[in-house]
Amino acid sequence: MTSELEKIDLIRARLGVGYKEAKEALDAAEGDVVQALISLEQKNRDWNEKLYGKGNEFIAQFKSIIEKGHKTKVKVKKDDKTVVEFPATIGALGVLGAMASTPILIVSALGTIAGLANNYRLEFDRTREDNWQPEVEVPDDTCDNQPQH
């Protein structure tokens, strides 16, 4: 007869779980090793599917943020003249890069102060693609020129 410790070791070797998880599964299956293995496999499969779903949701949200960033332009202006214009995602990457490096952060802060002192300003311009209109309109009378059957 196989001891409880040998059953737990068998479950751990097959599924790579800890002693506690193996013992709990074995107790829930009333000592049946095969049933404990099936139960743990199902639990791991459910967890992996949930993790996969959350990963896809995160990727979709990340893509949405990137798309919104590309539609938003950051303009550096002095008076009414645009000095430089770039997508907001590039600006965000610049901020992250500045935060990652102290010397870049100091230079960025000094540049910002110098820009403010010289009356430069930032403008954010969100392009609206949902109001897009076609450049070429199709005449309505094209249907009248077709032969009748």
Image: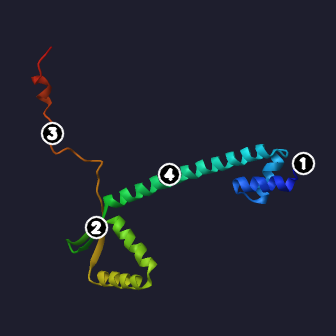
Task: Indicate the quadrant where residue 70 lies.
Answer: bottom left
Pointer 4 or 3: first along the chain: 4
Is 18 on the left or on the right of 44, as rendered?
A: right
- Position of residue 112 measured from the top left corner of the image (x, y, whole percent): 34, 81
Q: What secondary structure is marked by label 2?
A: strand
Closer to the eye: label 4 or 2: 4
Residue under pointer 2:
86
Sequence order check: which comes first, mark 1 or mark 4? 1
Q: CA distance from mark 3 to mark 1?
A: 85 Å
The residue that mark 4 highlights is: 56
* Residue indicated by mark 3: 137
User: Please, is residue 27 above or below residue 125 in the view?
Assistant: above
Quarter of the image for the C terminus: give it.
top left
- Disc 3 and disc 1 in contact, CB within 8 angstroms: no
Q: Is residue 86 visible?
A: yes
Label 1 close to label 4 by CB (< 8 Å): no
**Label 3 neighbour load within 10 Å: few <14, some 14-19, many 20+:** few
| Amino acid marked by disc 4 | Asn
Distance in Å between CA atoms under marks 4 and 3: 40 Å
Q: Amino acid at mark 2?
A: Phe
Place of residue 13 in the rendered image (x, y in percent of width and height, measured from the top left): 73, 56
In the drawing, does residue 28 fall left or right of residue 103?
right
Gap between marks 1 and 4, in whole Å? 47 Å
The residue singled out by tag 1 in the image is 1
